[in-house]
Image (tube, grey):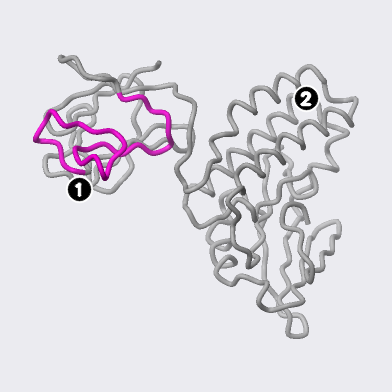
């Protein structure tokens, strides 16, 4: 059962379904199943729970999907790479909420599914196990091994393209580092307007800005108008956003004050004003 192989869980697979029968009640996570139900529009294969002779049984509906393993012999390198990137993007999106645990996501060609448009969908497995400290490292290794094995086992895939892709992956997979906040490739920064100040490099998926050193990632101590936790910059769904964290003097995008506790997208060139301190989002 991939990275969540366990005893007392029986797997069965047909052309249009995948099922898991839990021999023990305490193996099944009802909370995890609720989370799964809330995420089914976000690239997770739909599933339902049935009672089979007093035991929990999960059915995943594969009517619209085929396993990546089945499709591999018919894919060219570009399509394969696009599917893997789409899969990783969806893993990143659903793990952002803090409720989905990465070690319960299927990470092998048997458990990555693809629809007719070559879009990836994944299996989430609501089992009662505590996440390990190395969950993200293990996930990264599984992805790298999966790409390596695809390259070695299929003549239809270009070895050189996949070797280059593997190098790119190894540089990018550190975005999966746990706790919802991840390192990202530093491609943008906030540059102070009018006065010399240190640029704010955006190298994590969330960066909290304010004047209380104990509460934030980036300290602005030179301006008393800045709140203790003023705002945060968030990178999600391949876009940068800003969220005001209830600051006294507000956060502004291009002169317009934004509402508290809501994400607002920002683009390169936008002016981000924290109270009376103005920055511009620029590419590095």
Q: Which x, y percent locates residue 89?
A: 58, 38
Direction from residue 89 to residue 274 in the image, left or right: left
- Magenta span has 213? yes
| Tag count | 2
Q: Which x, y percent locates residue 199?
A: 29, 20
Point 22% across, 38% down: residue: 210
Direction from residue 23 to residue 234 in the image, left or right: left
The correct choice, above or below, for 184 with respect to 8 in the image is: above
- Magenta span has 169? no
* Alpha carbon distance from label 1 to label 2: 48 Å
Residues at badges 1 and 2 in contact (C-beta under 8 Å)? no
Indicate which label's residue lies in the foreground, 1 or 2: 1
Q: What is the residue that sits farthest to the bottom in this orientation? A: 54
Mark nearer the N terminus (1 vs 2): 2
Q: Quadrant of residue 117?
A: top right
Direction from residue 75 to residue 100 in the image, left or right: left
Q: Badge 2, how many Cα within 10 Å: few under 14, some, many 20+?
A: many
The correct choice, above or below, for 29 with respect to 64 in the image is: below
In terms of secondary structure, where does tag 1 sit? Answer: loop
User: What is the span of residues highlighted in magenta in the rendered image?
Assistant: 200-228
Q: Badge 1, how many Cα within 10 Å: few under 14, some, many 20+?
A: some
Which label belongs to residue 77?
Answer: 2
| Residue denoted by label 1 | 246
The quadrant of the image that shows the C terminus is: top left
Q: Nearer the viewer, residue 235 or 211?
A: 211
Point 79% across, 67% down: residue: 7
Q: Which x, y percent locates residue 195?
A: 15, 15
Q: Which x, y percent locates residue 248?
A: 12, 44
The correct choice, above or below, for 53 with respect to 179 in the image is: below
């Amino acid at each position: 059962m991939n990275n969540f192989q366990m005893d007392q869980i029986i797997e069965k697979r047909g052309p249009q379904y995948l099922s898991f029968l839990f021999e023990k009640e305490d193996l099944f996570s009802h909370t995890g199943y609720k989370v799964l139900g809330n995420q089914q529009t976000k690239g997770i294969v739909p599933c339902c729970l049935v009672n089979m002779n007093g035991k929990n049984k999960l059915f995943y509906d594969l009517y619209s999907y085929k396993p990546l393993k089945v499709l591999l012999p018919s894919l060219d390198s570009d399509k394969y790479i696009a599917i893997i990137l789409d899969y990783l993007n969806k893993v990143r999106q659903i793990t952002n909420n803090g409720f989905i645990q990465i070690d319960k996501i299927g990470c092998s060609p048997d458990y990555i599914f693809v629809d007719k448009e070559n879009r990836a969908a994944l299996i989430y497995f609501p089992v009662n196990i505590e996440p390990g400290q190395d969950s993200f490292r293990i996930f990264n290794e599984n992805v790298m091994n999966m790409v390596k094995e695809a390259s070695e086992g299929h003549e239809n895939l270009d070895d050189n393209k996949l070797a280059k892709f593997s190098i790119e992956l190894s540089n990018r997979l550190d975005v999966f580092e746990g706790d919802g906040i991840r390192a990202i490739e530093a491609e943008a920064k906030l540059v102070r307007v009018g006065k010399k100040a240190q640029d704010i490099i955006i190298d994590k998926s969330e960066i909290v800005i304010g004047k209380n050193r104990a509460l934030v990632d980036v300290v602005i101590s030179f301006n008393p108008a800045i709140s203790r936790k003023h705002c945060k910059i968030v990178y999600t769904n391949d876009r940068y956003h800003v969220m005001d964290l209830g600051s006294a003097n507000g956060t502004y995008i291009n002169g317009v004050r934004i509402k508290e506790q809501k994400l607002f997208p920002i683009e390169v060139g936008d002016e981000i004003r924290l109270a009376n301190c103005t920055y511009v989002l620029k590419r590095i």
